[in-house]
Image (cartoon, coloured by chain):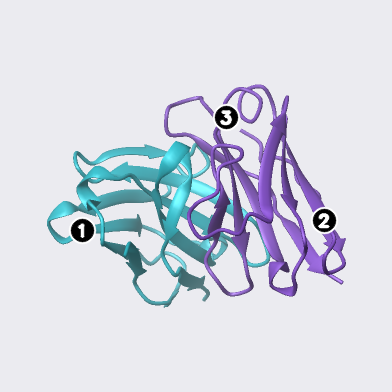
């Protein structure tokens, strides 16, 4: 069974840094693209970026380029999403997902809720 | 690129059929057969219901079907059931680079 397990909810202050994680199991982590999606409160899904853990090839949505960093450690089947300086507007639910057939997101993590507030 | 356009809401009575549209451009929906649909219940992660315009993953009821005409894709839910009440999002490969993806704004489906 494919599983993506994300790290727990976070409460941070503006300006702080953060890295959240997404651990894959039940499939070849190295050979599947992993994407990150943002869902702001009461809003829709937004694609942030994607990584291929096998060679760390990473692409970003123009909307998120420069504000977040996506990385992966294939030795522990884990992908990461990192912020160096959080803003209140980063408050959202963040999902990782495994890309499957035809550029679809077949398997999703349970989500990590991030709250940024002073 | 802009999000795909979906109606904010749709509704139907149990047993009826409902169709949700997803309108893009020739650079995304119209240009590729890589449209997918996701169901999201409150407080839950999204779940893929349709991929590659009309393909159903294993375990998804055949009450769910997808189609595309020009720049508009559609999701039809037949024989509506109470558990179908959820938010539905479309997504398309956008083509500006091989990994680019765009989502619709979502449609709240209410089963009356």
Q: What's the mark number on residue A77?
A: 1
The image quadrant that residue B27 belongs to is: top right
Image spot of residue B108 (x, y percent): 76, 61
Instruction: Classify residue A24 as left or right of residue B83.
Output: left
Q: Is residue B13 visible?
A: yes
Of the chain colours in the picture, the one used for chain A is cyan
Q: Which chain's residue wears label 3?
A: B
For image coordinates 44% across by 70% down, the residue present is A110
Of the chain colours in the picture, the one used for chain B is purple
Where the N terminus of chain A falls, by quadrant?
bottom left
Q: Which residue is mark 3?
A: B33
**Element type at mark 2:** loop
Image spot of residue B63 (x, y percent): 68, 56
Q: Which chain's residue wears label 2?
A: B
Q: Which residue is mark 2?
A: B17
Q: Which chain's residue wears label 1?
A: A
Going by the picture, which residue comes out furthest to the left?
Answer: A75
B70 and A66: which one is in front? Answer: B70
Instruction: Classify residue B85 as left or right of residue A6.
Output: right
The image quadrant that residue B29 belongs to is: top right
**Element type at mark 1:** loop
């Amino acid at each position: 069974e494919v599983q993506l397990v994300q790290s727990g909810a976070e409460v941070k202050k503006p300006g702080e840094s953060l890295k959240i994680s997404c651990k894959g199991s039940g499939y070849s982590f190295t050979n599947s693209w992993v994407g990150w999606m943002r869902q702001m409160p009461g809003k829709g899904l937004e694609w942030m970026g994607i990584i291929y853990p096998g060679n760390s090839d990473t692409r970003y949505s123009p909307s998120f380029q420069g504000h977040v960093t996506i990385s992966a450690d294939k030795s522990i089947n884990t992908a990461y999403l990192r912020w160096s300086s959080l803003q209140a507007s980063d408050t959202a639910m963040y999902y990782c997902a495994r890309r499957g057939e035809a550029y679809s997101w077949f398997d999703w993590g349970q989500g990590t809720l991030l709250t940024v507030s002073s | 690129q802009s999000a795909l356009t979906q109606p904010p809401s749709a509704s139907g009575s149990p047993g009826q059929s409902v169709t949700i549209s997803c309108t893009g451009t020739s650079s995304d929906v119209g240009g590729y057969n890589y449209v997918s649909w996701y169901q999201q219940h409150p407080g839950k992660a999204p779940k893929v219901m349709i991929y590659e315009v009309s393909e159903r993953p294993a375990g998804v009821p055949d009450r769910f079907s997808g189609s595309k005409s020009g720049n508009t894709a559609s999701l039809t839910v037949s024989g509506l059931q109470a558990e179908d009440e959820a938010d539905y999002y479309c997504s398309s490969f956008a083509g500006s680079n091989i990994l680019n993806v765009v989502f619709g704004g979502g449609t709240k489906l209410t089963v009356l």
